[in-house]
Image (tube, rainbow, N blue to C red):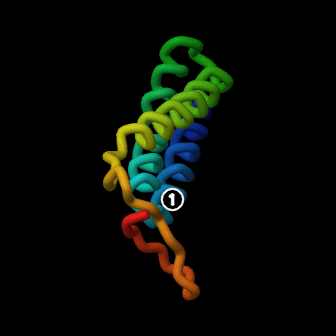
Amino acid sequence: MKAFNVAVVVVAAAALLSACATNEQDRRAGTGAVVGAGVGAIAGQAIGKNTRSTVGGAAGGALLGAVVGTASTPSQGRNQCRYRRNDGTIYVAPC
């Protein structure tokens, strides 16, 4: 039961952090991390049947999920660059 509680805390923390995303790539990375952490925690518990395996699986799954989420973001255009205005907002325009 303790392993389940740890997994719930890890997934909840990842979900809260993914809510702070400001662009499509960050949202996909956050969503991938949340899903990966959940799947990794379940797989870790099923394989190792202890807390250490659950936490390790959640961490590995979150990392892999964030990488896949980031890599699966469609490109905005070949000659598009991101610029920052003086007020801190970011916009995309031709390079």
* Observer-nearest of 44 and 22: 22
Query: Residue at 49% of width from left, 40% of height from top?
Result: 66
| Percent of width and height locating residue 75 | 34, 48
Q: Residue furthest right?
A: 52
Q: Work out whether residue 1 can be spotted.
A: no
Q: What element carries label 1?
A: helix
- Indicate whether 89 appears above or below 47: below
Type of amino acid at the residue the image marks with label 1: Leu
Q: Residue furthest top?
A: 47
* Observer-nearest of 41 and 78: 78
85 relative position to 71: left or right: right
Q: What residue sits right under mark 1 in the picture?
A: 16
| Percent of width and height locating residue 2 | 61, 34
| Percent of width and height locating residue 18 | 48, 56
24 relative position to 48: left or right: left
| Percent of width and height locating residue 3 | 59, 31
User: Image quadrant of residue 36?
Assistant: top left
Query: Residue at 52% of width from left, 82% of height from top?
Result: 85
Quadrant in which the C terminus appears: bottom left
Query: Residue at 57% of width from left, 16% of height from top?
Result: 49
User: Image quadrant of residue 19?
Assistant: bottom left
- Indicate whether 86 appears above or below 6: below
Query: Residue at 43% of width from left, 29% of height from top?
Result: 39
Question: Could you classify mark 1 by the number of other residues whose Cα lies within 10 Å: few (under 14), some (14-19), or many (20 or more)?
Answer: few
Q: Work out whether residue 5 can be spotted.
A: yes
* Observer-nearest of 6 and 89: 89
User: Image quadrant of residue 1?
Assistant: top right
The number of numbered discs placed on residues in the rendered structure image is 1
